[in-house]
Image (cartoon, rainbow, N blue to C red):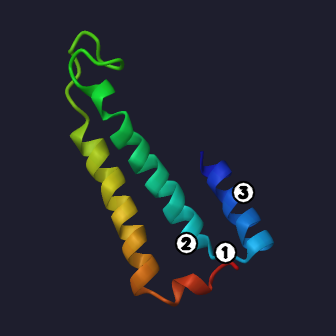
């Protein structure tokens, strides 16, 4: 996954002069949003937890949310980081 993010970030930077931070933030949002869309699969009786033996992955969801929020905040607060790429 890291190689795909890296290759896409480099390609978008070269082709459309898009800063790296926007591509990485987009991927983080995609990962977090994907978890939210399929959140019902993790509940008891869901696709990923049919027996209800695993607890809900709150920590994983919070980590994804924190990474996405941190990158999104960095996009708006730090103009210096937008200089990289593009």
Q: Residue at x 67, y 63 (%)?
A: 9
Name of the residue lying farthest toward the right: 15
Query: Where, by quadrant of the figure, is residue 41 drawn?
Result: top left
Asked if 36 appears above or below 79 in the picture, the reply is above
Point out residue 11 in the picture as x, y percentages from the top left corner. Answer: 76, 63
The quadrant of the picture occupied by the C terminus is: bottom right
Helix, strand or loop at label 3? It is helix
Please name the residue that numbered disc 1 is placed on: 18
Gap in Å between the C-alphas at discs 1 and 3? 13 Å
Going from the N terminus, do you reach mark 1 or mark 3 first? 3
Please give left or right for residue 86 compared with residue 55 in the image.
right
Point out residue 5 in the picture as x, y percentages from the top left corner. Answer: 62, 54
Please give left or right for residue 66 compared with residue 79 in the image.
left
Helix, strand or loop at label 1? It is loop
Quick one: label 3, few (<14), some, or many (20+) residues within 10 Å? few
Please name the residue that numbered disc 2 is placed on: 21
Please name the residue that numbered disc 3 is placed on: 7
Q: How many marks?
A: 3
């Amino acid at each position: 996954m890291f190689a795909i993010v890296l290759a896409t970030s480099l390609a978008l930077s070269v082709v459309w002069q898009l800063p790296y931070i926007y591509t990485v933030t987009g991927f983080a949002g995609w990962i977090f949003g994907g978890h939210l869309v399929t959140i019902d699969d993790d509940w008891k009786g869901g696709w990923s937890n049919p027996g209800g033996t695993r607890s809900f992955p709150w920590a994983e969801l919070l980590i994804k949310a924190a990474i996405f929020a941190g990158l999104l905040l960095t996009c708006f607060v730090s103009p210096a980081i937008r200089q990289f790429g593009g």
